[in-house]
Image (cartoon, rainbow, N blue to C red):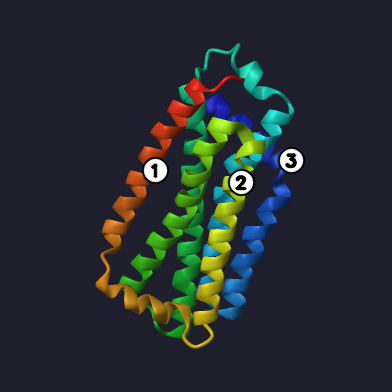
Amino acid sequence: MKALLIKDYCILIREVKQMLLVPVVFTVMAVVTKQLVWILWPVFFISLLPYTINSYEEQSNWPLYAETMPYGRKRIVYEKYAMMLINGMIMTLILSAVTASILLLKGSFDFAAMWQMIVLIIAGAILPGCLMLPMMFKYGNAKGRVMYLIVLAMFGGLMGAMGTASKDAKFYELLQYGHNMNFTVLLLGVLIVFFLSVRLSVHFYEKRDI
């Protein structure tokens, strides 16, 4: 799996490094505007990277070459999810620090709100990929693009709703309404969705004709 991860990050650096500017731009916007709603956009774009990299792999017929190598389809699936987790952990650390800085600058730091924001960041880094990767492994990037567009529309609508709400109340204040919700349970739910998605992707990819 280590070699597969190195391959994907080489593709990332060579082919899609420009996408890394998107999280940077939105993170800067969050700091400049001091609106935490912008924090969730970077994790969404980062969660798309395994899907984006797979499109380059299909263009170069990598799935056919991989069939001749001692990897096995299950390991190929695991590697994409491992990359998603690694990217998600990196973004969670960076954006958690940014979130804490914004709250401190506003003089409204609260551990409960901070924990809720961390859970939302983790969910944003994992759930979009969990929805898209099974369709990618079942149909390939071209046919699976419908799910990509659906997820993009759903996330865009959610961010639009949050942005509209934040005109009347700052986003960190909206998090106060989440005190009645157990965000630890939400995190456990995200992890359950992750493992179910992995199993579904393995099932689809092992049955798929390359």
For residue 47, which numbered disc appears in the image? none
Alpha-carbon span between mark 2 and mark 1: 20 Å
Residue annotated with mark 2: 146
Give the x, y percent position of residue 95: 50, 62
Which residue matches tag 1? 194
Q: Are marks 3 and 2 in contact (CB under 8 Å)?
A: no
Left or right of residue 122, residue 57 in this image: right
Separation (CA) of disc 3 from disc 2: 23 Å
Residue shown at 31% from the left, 51% from the top: 189
Q: Which mark is residue 15?
A: 3
**Nearest to viewer (mark 2 / mark 1):** 2
The residues tagged by marks 1 and 3 sit, at their Cα atoms, a distance apart of 27 Å
Q: Is residue 3 above or below residue 194?
A: above
Where is residue 126? Give x, y as percent.
Answer: 46, 49
> The residue tagged with tag 1: helix, strand or loop?
helix
Nearer-N-terminus badge (1/3): 3
Q: Give the residue at x 44% y 28%.
A: 202
Amino acid type shown at disc 3: Glu
Among the two numbered marks 3 and 2 on one chain, the one whose residue lies closer to the N terminus: 3
Q: Is residue 5 visible?
A: no
Image quadrant occupied by the C terminus: top right
Nearer mark to the viewer, of 3 and 2: 2
Residue 140 drawn at (x, y percent): 61, 32
> Residue at position x 54%, y 61% from top?
155
**Residue 139 image point, x, y percent:** 58, 32
Q: Residues within 10 Å of mark 3 (few under 14, many from 20)?
A: few
**Which quadrant holds residue 122?**
bottom left
Q: Earlier in the sequence, mark 2 or mark 1?
A: 2
